[in-house]
Amino acid sequence: MTESSDYTPPNVWTWTKPSGGQFANINRPIAGPTHDKDLPVGRHPLQLYSLATPNGQKVTIMLEELLALGHSGAEYDAWLIRIGQGDQFGSGFVQVNPNSKIPALMDRSGPEPIRVFESGAILLYLAEKFGALLPAEARLRAECLSWLFWQMGSAPYIGGGFGHFYAYAPVKIEYAIDRFAMEAKRQLDVLDRRLGESRYLAGDDYTIADIAVFPWYGGLVEGWLYGAAAEFLSVQEYRNIRRWVDAILPRPAVKRGRMVNRTFGELSDQLHERHDASDFETRTQDKLIAAGEG
């Protein structure tokens, strides 16, 4: 293995230059807003501020699944937060999520607005609010929550670890790529073994655990993430994940949820903002062209 540099860490780290890489313009070692900007508020009870990253997709898929189950109270406005342009550092967004990460949700259905941030927390909040997609029986509920929190703890090694060093870092570091590729494959093996013994992650029924895990690990298997990562990680080995992805991907709510707040890929797959169910029918090319983006 090659050594990458002669760099020696200083005794005390200080921020003296941009970190480099694709997201250098939004990386900084301090929290809080960088500018004043109020968030828009639509007419529905739930106001979502997001982008169709894997974490953002979790919540839009969840909301579309709830609506498909007949929960009309899950109607929502989905506002686009362009993280590459620093929208997440606006004062209004920071009030909803002091961590300045998407997605962030405001529930305005009650007498006092309730903020919810972190995608796993939002999924759990919505599941409890509507009594759906979360098992009631103690054993199954524990299994569901265990896989939900497994995803929350594991995915940073996929995104900020493997994905960053494989696809986004300004230099390719063999040690870093090898380290996180090993961990990515270990996690895929964990998931594949579980799905070899269970139809879905918590058992026979589709739950918030599947909704949380699918955009990340299904995204790897489908080749949606990090360029040639699927080939690099030999994802074809994980046949049980493949079976699970094939069961989830055709769901109408999953298809709709993946479109919301999407600004990349085919125009036909993009719905920058969602304010009504009819937006899926009148979306994409016409709206993008009208906005000067098509």
Image: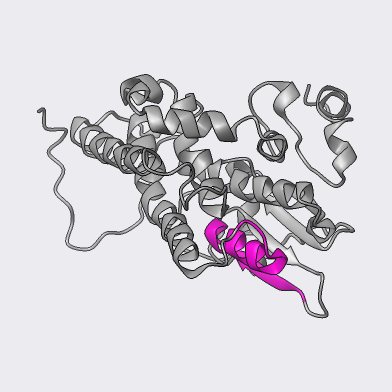
Q: Which of 186 and 178 is in front in this view?
A: 186
Rendered residue at 42%/44% (across/down): 198
Q: In this view, does 84 lie to the left or right of 44?
A: left
| Nearer to me, 52 or 12 | 52
Which x, y percent locates residue 158? 37, 41
User: In the depicted view, which residue is nearer to us: 58 or 83?
Assistant: 58
Q: Give percent across and percent down for residue 266.
A: 68, 21
Snapshot quadrant of residue 227: top left
Q: Quadrant of the N terminus?
A: top left
Q: In which quarter of the image is residue 107?
A: bottom right
Residue at the farthest bottom position: 111
Magenta span: 113-133
- Confirm whether residue 285 shows in the render: yes
Membership of 118 in magenta stretch: yes
Q: Residue at x 57, y 41 (%)?
A: 53
Give the quadrant of the C terminus.
top right
Relative height, residue 110 to residue 38 (above, below): below
Queried whether the magenta region covers residue 218, the answer comes back as no
Residue 282 locus on image (x, y percent): 89, 30
In this rendering, the answer to whether 167 lies above or below 81 is above
